[in-house]
């Protein structure tokens, strides 16, 4: 896709925007950062953990972070949900300001044959051990079913898996990851598109800091039309906790969204961190410009504040799904 | 707890009930099976995967399965949610008929010192590598923060982790798991209760087969009063999918629970498996005997069937939370 360079508003505008993502280089987050922001006019900054990416935006060391929220096959990324739930209020200034759908293709990556012959002619070459991110096993079950009994070793990212294989003395060890991860680690793509579902995609959220002078009012690059075009769709993310001993408290909270005619596009729950079996809910809702009141989310928040224990508006952004699906 | 032996109704009643759980021996699932059913009058049958435990009940090779649904710190066990969602209709006869709350204590487990001196005097002995189930890392973050940089290796269960350590030549390799796992693998408990939260618990669901002659009408052993005692609470689990392109479809489905006065105790969503970004929802609701209509769940299902794409009553059972918390 064509990347749009966001204009910066402050005196620091000569400095390139810094985009934090979960490294190492070659991860799917890196690929999403390249596709969404572009690498020419931005500094793409790999982080060791999701926490570090959140911290970088909170501390304004980074202008944006691009963080995976969910995969179409595997579901939610719970670490991201927990960071968004922000039970310890570590990231009070972080807001979600965009989303990006990345089509995820997995490749079987192995060392280049020393004799230069390559392995590509073999349909399913012998593999002694697989390395990948744990989320990936569930995305390549058909391919992996042909390798019953072969050990699967979790790595912190698909790119780390490729790095491990590149340093492994065993020529039969293999990584599953992106072409980019293979390229950066000098591995060969033995088999491409080994994912179960060719429409396999990961949705990333784009985070920025509400108080940043550099990005305030500057939306991240987004493919689809702006939220303020009539008929365009906007999504908002709201977190809340309810008194779990009060019957109907959750239903009442969800009813507020219905009352204002907002479509619920997703609901996730995570342990609330205060008391066992009490949850924090992350609800994503959708509104249509010109159909819903412009201030509908503020109104929902105001009502939720009355009937919930905690409640936070985590941000609004333009829905990118229709253009990318 | 005292275990209650369920009476079996068929001609096979002389055979002991078979309880499937995720093995190997010494896993937390094993511990839950021992505590909930007892090992004296039951055959406790370890399974290699959650799928195998579900299949054993569906094929009636096992009478019950005891399966972890969620942990109070880590949240839902997504493999269990996916099996309950049963998108391919592999387990049409499985019903949830009970729950069991297991208090989870983790121990640092290492090989017994060869000289018989033991390691217990050291507050934090040197560790070269940790082995445990991936869910455990998030439950022992305080303890593990004292071991920054030490490699953490995922194992398929805490018991498998203990087994790996028992066979490892490195005396500094350590497992994190239950006392039972340590005992069964001849490891020493170097430090007990290393979990962040001493109220850390895992909720297990008990599954049985609707069509089984052996267990039909026989409820699994449950601590708390029966569902038919006035004031007692019952939980039910219902799965459904809604047309995600229809605004308000999810809110409408959830509204049915509110209409009948049912308290929503949890909502989980998982990818629907048909189309990207379409979800199957697993909603757990609670009713009170004597307050709600006895057939309220049937009525909810009937209404949901009209407004959802798929809908299934996954079972009802006595709420065990109040007695165990």
Image (cartoon, coloured by chain):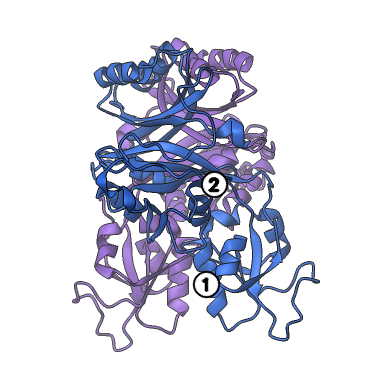
Chain colours: A purple, B blue
Q: In the picture, residue B162 is in which quadrant?
A: bottom right
Q: Chain of mark 1?
A: B
Q: Position of residue A38 (x, y in %)?
A: 45, 49
Q: Position of residue B300 (x, y in %)?
A: 34, 18
Residue B163 is labelled as 1
Residue A132 visible, this orientation: yes
Circle 1 residues within 10 Å: few <14, some 14–19, many ≥20: many
Q: Is residue B174 left or right of residue B237?
A: right
Q: Is residue B240 left or right of residue A272?
A: left
Towards the viewer: B106 or A113: B106
Q: Position of residue B3 (x, y in %)?
A: 52, 45
Task: Find numbered disc 1 in the image and state the secondary structure of the residue it sits on.
Answer: helix
Q: Nearer the viewer, mark 1 or mark 2?
A: 1
Q: Is residue B36 left or right of residue B171?
A: left
Q: In the picture, residue B213 is in which quadrant?
A: top left
Towards the viewer: A42 or B28: B28
Q: Which residue is mark 2?
A: A79
């Amino acid at each position: 896709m064509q990347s749009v360079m966001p204009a910066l508003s402050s005196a620091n505008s000569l400095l390139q925007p810094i985009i934090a993502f979960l490294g190492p280089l070659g991860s799917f987050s890196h690929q999403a950062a390249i596709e969404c922001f572009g690498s020419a006019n931005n500094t793409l900054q790999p982080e060791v953990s999701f926490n570090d990416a959140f911290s970088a935006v909170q501390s304004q060391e980074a202008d944006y972070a691009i963080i995976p929220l969910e995969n179409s096959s595997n579901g939610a990324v719970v670490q991201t949900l927990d960071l968004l739930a922000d039970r310890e209020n570590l990231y009070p200034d972080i807001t979600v300001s965009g989303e990006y759908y990345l089509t995820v293709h997995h490749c079987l990556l192995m060392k280049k044959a020393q004799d230069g012959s390559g392995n590509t002619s073999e349909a399913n070459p012998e593999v002694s051990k697989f390395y990948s991110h744990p989320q990936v096993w569930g995305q390549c079950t058909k391919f992996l079913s042909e390798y019953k009994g072969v050990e699967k070793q979790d790595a912190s990212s698909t790119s780390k898996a490729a790095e491990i294989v590149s340093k492994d003395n065993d020529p039969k060890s293999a990584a599953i990851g992106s072409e980019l991860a293979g390229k950066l680690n000098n591995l060969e793509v033995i088999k491409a598109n080994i994912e179960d579902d060719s429409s396999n995609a990961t949705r990333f959220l784009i985070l920025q800091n509400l108080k940043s002078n550099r990005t305030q009012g500057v939306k991240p690059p987004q493919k689809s039309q702006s939220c303020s075009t009539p008929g365009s769709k906007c999504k908002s993310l709201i977190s809340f906790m309810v008194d779990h001993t009060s019957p109907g408290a959750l239903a009442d909270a969800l009813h507020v969204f219905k009352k204002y005619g907002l479509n619920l596009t997703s609901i996730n729950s995570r342990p609330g961190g205060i008391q066992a079996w009490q949850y924090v809910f992350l609800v994503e809702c959708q509104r249509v410009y010109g159909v819903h009141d412009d201030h509908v989310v503020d109104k929902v928040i105001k009502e939720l504040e009355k009937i919930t224990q905690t409640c936070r508006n985590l941000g609004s952004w333009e829905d990118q799904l229709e253009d990318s699906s």
